[in-house]
């Protein structure tokens, strides 16, 4: 693979190439080659079909279990087809999210791609967030059974979302093959299931809107917010007020509101600049987020919490600290990257940084800066650490109810540890010796002196 092809390749291809080079250069020998071969078979041939089949089934099972219902194959299958209510909700929800991306609004540019395209996004996230809340509460006032219905029909809702998301992913793959939006953004051919899983295009558009802004931000994140409100209302209708349930709702709501406040910053993250629009992101945001990210709140409707008011207050304090510190870490990098020549002040002192070099897709030399002070001088992914603290805190109201209310937290540990390695592989590829120097100055990934 040539240098420029590698730059344009998705994370997986670049990482595989990097891993391959490391293996070949570092260890050499038949053993290392066989290990790399096995890794390739698992990564490209075995894992994608497994995930494509297992995860849609898993969400249906989780939804059924969360209601305290026995697992019965026929019920699972029937409910996975959806219901008139579920399809109406999904249709209305997708149309609402799409409409808000079509309304006249200020726009914001995302980072230019290596193939020379600058994506443009609607910058009306905060207004959309509040308008969606108002619309939801109005609907709840008109149909008092709405929240309880959403909870009771969650398996049907996930079934409808599953079908919608899988059709969207199939369409995106076919479109990328036949009519790619940016022909310079070509991918080397890979096994079909792998392509379906990773996606092919970086910034596809559909019906005049950016697909990732629609699925990730507007449907997934806002769906998360509205569902947990519905679950809270359903829980109060069933069991009355509980401080622990309220803390569970409020912490997540602060986290989600913060996301919309920072939506423009999200366009510079791995999801947008590196990951392509396929099953991982689009199915993930349309189905996995509504199912797993809301699961602690969903579970508490059928299983009321036993955590008392003092425990709830402790969880609230811990969660607020985690969420605000996560935001602080992201903000420090945003301020630093926006400051001319990196000249800004952090923690009362001028920021210190490394100037690092890389090459763009055309092979032209470029420079960037890596912060070595403030939060980014403490650990290389302190934002992930605080994100985990926040997530743990909003799962704590489920303490004493077994592992289920903590499912999101367990998933997030795996996702963020994996993401740490993925991101560092990307940075090592991009900055080479500059990244190694940064790692010497900031030796820990998530927790100082531990990892
Ligand atoms: N709840 C959830 O499911 C998840 C939440 N998140 C959250 O989303 C947010 C964004 O996370 P994510 O996109 O994963 O990654 P980061 O925000 O950590 O961004 C990583 C990038 O930052 C740049 N960078 C790395 N080190 C430095 C440094 N020292 N100084 C300046 N820039 C640096 C590099 O990009 P460059 O090429 O520009 O140098 C690197 O690729 C976080 O708050 C995270 O916690 C993330 C994943 C999942
Ligand atoms: C297919 C599944 C096995 C995995 C699907 C994972 C995706 C749904 C999630 C992967 C990364 C996630 C996110 C990244 C960063 C975010 C910023 C944060 O402030 C809010 C949450 C999020 C948008 C988050 C959403 C889910 C993912 C896209």
Image (cartoon, rainbow, N blue to C red):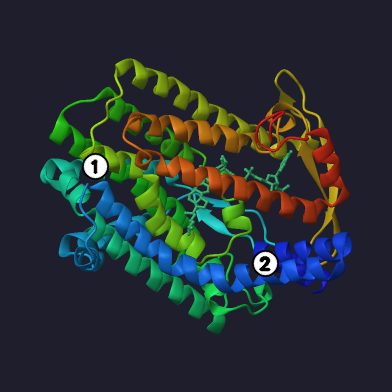
Say which quarter of the image contains residue 300. Answer: top left
Residue situated in front as seen by the camera: 10 or 80: 80
Q: Helix, strand, or loop for circle 1?
A: helix
Hey, which residue is sitting farthest front in the picture?
Answer: 31
Q: CA distance from mark 1 to mark 2?
A: 43 Å
**Quadrant location of the C terminus in the rendered image:** top right
Q: Quadrant of ligand 1?
A: top right
Q: Nearer the viewer, residue 428 or 33?
A: 33
| Residue 114 can be seen in this image | no
Label 2: which residue? 39
Quarter location, residue 304: top left
How many tags in the picture? 2
Question: What crowding class fits label 2: few (fewer than 14 Cα within 10 Å), some (14-19), or many (20 or more)?
Answer: some
In the image, taking residue 52 as reference, residue 202 lies left or right, namely right
Which residue position holds label 1?
230
On the image, the x and y values in percent for residue 254 come to 41, 32
Against 237, residue 200 (above or below) is below
């Amino acid at each position: 693979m040539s240098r420029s092809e590698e730059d344009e390749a998705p994370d997986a291809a670049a990482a595989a190439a990097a891993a391959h080079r490391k293996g070949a250069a570092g260890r050499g020998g038949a053993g290392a080659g066989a290990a790399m071969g096995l890794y390739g078979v698992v990564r490209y041939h075995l894992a994608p079909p497994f995930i494509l089949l297992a995860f849609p089934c898993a969400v249906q099972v989780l939804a059924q279990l969360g209601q305290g219902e026995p697992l019965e194959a026929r019920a699972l299958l029937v409910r996975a087809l959806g219901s008139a209510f579920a399809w109406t909700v999904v249709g209305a929800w997708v149309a609402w999210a799409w409409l808000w991306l079509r309304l006249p609004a200020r726009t914001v540019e995302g980072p230019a791609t290596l193939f020379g395209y600058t994506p443009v996004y609607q910058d009306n996230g905060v207004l959309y967030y509040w308008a969606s809340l108002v619309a939801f509460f109005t609907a709840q006032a008109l149909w008092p059974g709405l929240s309880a219905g959403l909870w009771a029909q969650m398996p049907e809702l996930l079934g409808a979302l599953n079908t919608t998301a899988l059709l969207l992913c199939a369409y995106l793959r076919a479109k990328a093959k036949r009519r790619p939006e940016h022909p310079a953004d070509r991918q080397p051919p890979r096994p079909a299931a792998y392509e379906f899983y990773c996606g092919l295009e970086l910034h596809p558009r559909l019906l005049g809107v950016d697909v990732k802004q629609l699925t990730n931000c507007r449907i997934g994140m806002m769906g998360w917010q509205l569902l947990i409100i519905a679950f809270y209302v359903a829980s109060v209708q069933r069991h009355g007020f509980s401080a622990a349930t309220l803390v569970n709702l409020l912490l997540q709501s602060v986290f989600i509101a913060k996301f919309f406040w920072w939506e423009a910053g999200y366009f510079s993250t791995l999801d947008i600049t590196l990951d392509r629009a396929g099953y991982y992101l689009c199915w993930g945001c349309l189905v996995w987020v509504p199912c797993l990210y809301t699961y602690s709140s969903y579970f508490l409707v059928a299983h009321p919490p036993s955590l008392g008011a003092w425990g709830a207050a402790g969880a609230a304090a811990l969660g607020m600290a985690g969420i605000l510190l996560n935001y602080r870490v992201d903000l420090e990098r945003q301020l630093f990257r926006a400051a001319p020549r990196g000249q800004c002040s952090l923690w009362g002192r001028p920021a210190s940084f490394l100037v690092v070099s890389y090459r763009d897709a055309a092979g032209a030399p470029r420079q960037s800066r890596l912060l070595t002070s403030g939060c980014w001088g403490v650990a290389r992914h302190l934002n992930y650490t605080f994100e985990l603290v926040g997530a743990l805190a909003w799962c704590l109201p489920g303490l004493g109810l077994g592992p289920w209310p903590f499912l999101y937290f367990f998933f997030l540990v795996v996702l963020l540890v994996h993401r740490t390695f993925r991101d560092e592989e990307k940075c090592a590829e991009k900055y080479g010796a500059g990244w190694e120097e940064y790692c010497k100055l900031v030796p820990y990934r998530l927790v100082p002196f531990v990892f």
